[in-house]
Amino acid sequence: MTDAALRELRAGDDDRLNIWLRQPDVGRWWGSAAAGRAKIGLARDTGGAICRMIESAGESVGYAQAMDAGALGGTRPKTVPPGAWECDVFIGSAAHRGQGLGQRALDLLVGEIFR
């Protein structure tokens, strides 16, 4: 079983994120690369949002973010209660997919939200 860790974004992460966002597998979940960049940009610009790189064995392999659903404004479905969070995770490294890293990263992200 491969371990997952989360770390804060660094300035040099943008190039890797852009490469991953152009991959068809990531695009099926996040939409176009432009939509993915906009979603990440919104999270970066939203106070209290969490933006993290997913690492495995010290290598960046994916991205995770969480935002208070209230920050989504009018796009938040009325059935989502106040205080709910929207979490998104993707494994950008094809070699690291199918190993449970996404679920472990999500668990770490949820732990960070409610810490």
Image: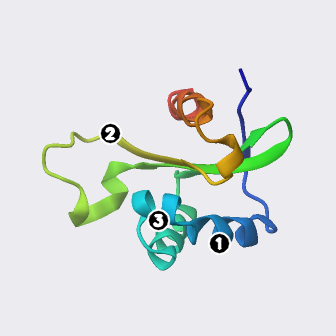
Mark drawn on residue 27: 3
Question: What kind of residue is marked 1?
Answer: Asn
Quadrant in which residue 28 is drawn: bottom left
* Residue under the point 47% across and 67% down: 39
Question: What kind of residue is marked 2?
Answer: Ala
Residue to which mark 1 is pinned: 18
Residue 38, given in percent of the width and then of the height, sits at 48, 74
Quadrant in which residue 98 is drawn: top right
- Asked if disc 2 and disc 3 are in contact, CB closer than 8 Å, the reply is no
Per the image, label 3 sits on a secondary structure element best described as: helix
Residue density around tag 2, few if under 14, some if 14–19, many if 20 or more, within 10 Å: few
Per the image, label 1 sits on a secondary structure element best described as: helix
Residue 15, given in percent of the width and then of the height, sits at 74, 72
Q: Is residue 58 above or below residue 107?
A: below
Residue 31, given in percent of the width and then of the height, sits at 41, 68
Query: N-terminal of the two: label 2 or label 1?
Result: 1
Taking the image as shown, residue 36 lies to the left or right of residue 53, namely left
Kindly report the distance in space between the C-alpha atoms of the residues bearing marks 3 and 1: 11 Å
Taking the image as shown, residue 9 lies to the left or right of residue 77, namely right
Query: N-terminal of the two: label 2 or label 3?
Result: 3
Question: What kind of residue is marked 3?
Answer: Gly
Residue to which mark 2 is pinned: 84
Per the image, label 2 sits on a secondary structure element best described as: loop
Quadrant in which residue 17 is drawn: bottom right
